[in-house]
Image (cartoon, rainbow, N blue to C red):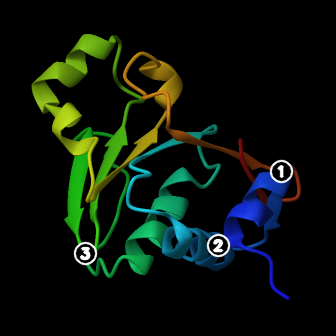
């Protein structure tokens, strides 16, 4: 009997490659109910946040490249679900999000993936899924869903 991707993530998973991280994200995305619309991705540079979002995108049939929106702040992708990908790293205050009108994307069928959510804690809804990502000394990545 296989264990769900969410159960594995809650217990903590170590991946050795970007492909493994994307596959895990895709498996979890396939299980994700439509009412789960916000994912907060916590982790340092290189921890695998964007790689995880790429896996979500693959699962939802998004074929265009998914890259970190560090300079654009937010990228939008259309597949079987709509994905808004926010990188809050360069934000210095939450009010800067007002111009992006992201509140409109906190409802189904959207999923909002936020990199660096600790920069905008008041914007992250109470029901958000929080994923901790870390780069280990051996180069592998550790992922854990809170």
Q: Quadrant of the C terminus?
A: top right
Dot 3: element: loop
* Relative to 106, residue 119 above or below: above
Residue at mark 2 to residue at mark 3: CA–CA distance: 18 Å
Of pointers 2 and 3, the one earlier in the residue sequence: 2
Residue at mark 1 to residue at mark 2: CA–CA distance: 17 Å
Seen at 81% across and 85% down, the residue is 2
Is 60 left, or right, of 138 in this rendering?
Answer: left
Position in image of residue 27 (x %, y %): 59, 76
Dot 3 alpha-carbon crowd within 10 angstroms: few under 14, some 14 to 19, many 20 or more: some
Q: Which residue is mark 2?
A: 24
Residue 139 shows in this picture: no
Q: Quadrant of the N terminus?
A: bottom right
Q: Quadrant of residue 28?
A: bottom right
Is 20 left, or right, of 28 in this rendering?
Answer: right
Of tags 1 and 3, the one toward the viewer is 3
Q: Which residue is mark 3?
A: 79
* Relative to 10, residue 120 above or below: above
Of pointers 1 and 2, the one earlier in the residue sequence: 2
Of pointers 1 and 3, the one earlier in the residue sequence: 3
Position in image of residue 10 (x %, y %): 77, 53
Q: Which mark is residue 98?
A: none
Is 99 left, or right, of 68 in this rendering?
Answer: left
Between 50 and 113, the one lying in front of the other is 113
Is 110 left, or right, of 15 in this rendering?
Answer: left
Q: Which residue is mark 1?
A: 136
Residue at mark 1 to residue at mark 3: CA–CA distance: 32 Å
Between 8 and 64, the one lying in front of the other is 8
Of tags 1 and 2, the one toward the viewer is 2
Dot 2: element: helix
């Amino acid at each position: 009997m296989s264990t769900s991707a969410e159960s594995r993530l809650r217990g903590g998973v170590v991946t050795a490659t970007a492909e493994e991280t994307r596959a895990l994200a895709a498996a979890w995305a396939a299980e994700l109910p439509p009412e789960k619309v916000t994912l907060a991705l916590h982790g340092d540079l290189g921890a695998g946040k964007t790689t995880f979002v790429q896996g979500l995108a693959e699962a939802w049939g998004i074929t265009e490249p998914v890259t970190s929106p560090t300079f654009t702040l937010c990228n939008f992708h259309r597949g079987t679900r709509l994905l808004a990908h926010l990188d809050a790293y360069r934000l210095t205050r939450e009010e800067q999000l007002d111009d992006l009108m992201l509140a409109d994307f906190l409802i189904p069928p959207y999923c909002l993936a936020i990199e660096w959510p600790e920069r905008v804690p008041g914007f992250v809804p109470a029901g958000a899924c929080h994923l901790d990502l870390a780069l280990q000394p051996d180069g592998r990545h550790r992922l854990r869903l809170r």
